[in-house]
Each structure stands twice: as structure tokens, then as C-alpha cells.
Image (tube, helix red, strand yellow):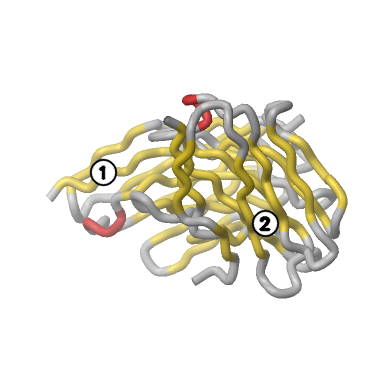
Amino acid sequence: GENVEQHPSTLSVQEGDSAVIKCTYSDSASNYFPWYKQELGKRPQLIIDIRSNVGEKKDQRIAVTLNKTAKHFSLHITETQPEDSAVYFCAASEDSNYQLIWGAGTKLIIKP
Amino acid sequence: DSGVTQTPKHLITATGQRVTLRCSPRSGDLSVYWYQQSLDQGLQFLIQYYNGEERAKGNILERFSAQQFPDLHSELNLSSLELGDSALYFCASSGNLGGNEQFFGPGTRLTVL
């Protein structure tokens, strides 16, 4: 079955700098890759997603890149702000069952 | 607000007891997922239902069971509770067409004393 690995587990960056979180997946049939943000005590919320027919997707300060050959995808956050502090989860799935396989999460800390 | 509702918000009970957590998915969503999140841990997938039928099973203990009713709401039953079952339990729902985005409810925080 699918397995998703996420690195790093904790990432601390200076406010204004960029942050990059990486995930690898094992199942070449996976074709949907979302990223969720979970603030402390809150529910996970989708922030961006990408499908396997696209290599990159951007939404303001966040972007996701996908390398199907290497089976990895990354979340890029530019010009980080204090409100970006949260835990970020990547996931992968294929259309046959809509089940998401989750990474272990990355705690992003934005230092003032 | 995601449109997914969960009750109760908080639940405090004793070891050995049984509790039921309830989830109402977004209008029109046929899939319901249950997750367990222990303190500072990731999302552990428990079980998925689609239109009333069990679709996938994750790391769900035998003491736990779930079902999805004809009106698509779902219940997660936890029995013979142990201290280690204390966690945040999330329900999520997704539609059957057009994407795999899962919308999460606010969660039920279970504390077993």
C-alpha cells in the first residue's frame, strides 16, 4: 500500500524567510497530493493541493511542486509570517478510494 | 466552518466505560472518515465509510467500532476505554465526485481518567 514520509518533523525559520517541507510517496498510482495546515487546538484545513497532471501550483505565498518521477512533492512558503506557525501535513491518494495516506506532520515555527 | 459537525465537543469519562462520538458530514458528502490524534501526534486514520458501507480500515482497535447511517451521519463507538485512548477524535467528509479534499469537523476531545 501507499506510504508517505514527511521531513523535517520540526522546522524553525526566521520571519520573512522561506520554508520548505518535503514529502515522498511510494505508490505510483497516487494522483492527488494535498497539504493541510493545523493550528494549535484547531482542525486540519486544506491550504493547497496538486494533481499528478500538474508540476507546480501556486497560491499567493504558498506553492506546491510535484516530481512524479522521483515520487516526491514539496510545500514552499515564502515571506513567512507569525500566523504561518502551525503543523503542516502532506497526504497522497488515488481516485479509486478517496482515502488519504498522511505524512507524520511538520511543526513550523516562525521566529520573530 | 467546514460544514462538518461533531458532538460532543468534550467528553470526560473513566477507564472501562463506553462512549459514542457523532459526526454529521457536509451536505451531499457520501464519505466519512474517522481519525485519532493524540497529543502532539499525527493523524491516525481509523476507518472510512462510503454511503453506508465500510470502505477502508486503518489502525482501529477491536474495542472501537463505527457505522454510517442512511442519513449519512456516522458514529464512532469506543468501549472498554483505557487511559491511552485519551485523544482528539476528528471526523472528516468528502464528496464522491471531483476531488478528494477532506473537510474536517472541529473534533471531539476525549479524556479518560
The structure residue drawn at horizontal position 57% and vertical position 27%, both measured from the top left corner, is B16
Instruction: Name the spot of residue B94 as percent of width and height, x first.
Output: 70, 61
Measuring 78% from the left and 49% from the top, which residue is drawn there? B67
Lower position in the chain sequence, tag 2 or tag 1: 2
Q: How many marks?
A: 2
User: Pointer 1: residues within 10 angstroms few (<14), some, or many (20+)?
Assistant: many
Residue A28: x %, y % from top left: 76, 37
Identify residue type, mark 2: Arg
User: What's the residue type where badge 1 is placed?
Assistant: Ile
Determine which residue is flagged by label 1. Answer: A109
| A52, B66: nearer the viewer | B66
B106 displayed left or right of B64: left
* Residue A29, placed above or below residue A47: above
Locate residue A103 relative to residue A94 in the image: left or right. left
- Residue B46 image point, x, y percent: 67, 38
Give the numbered dot on residue B79: none
Is residue A11 visible in the rendered structure shown here? yes
Residue A51 shows which numbered tag?
A: 2
Residue A95: percent from the left, percent from the top?
Answer: 80, 53
Task: Look at the numbered disc 2 and give the secondary structure of its residue.
Answer: strand
Determine the residue positioned at 70% across, 51% down: B75
Identify which residue, A52 or B108, lies in the foreground.
Answer: B108
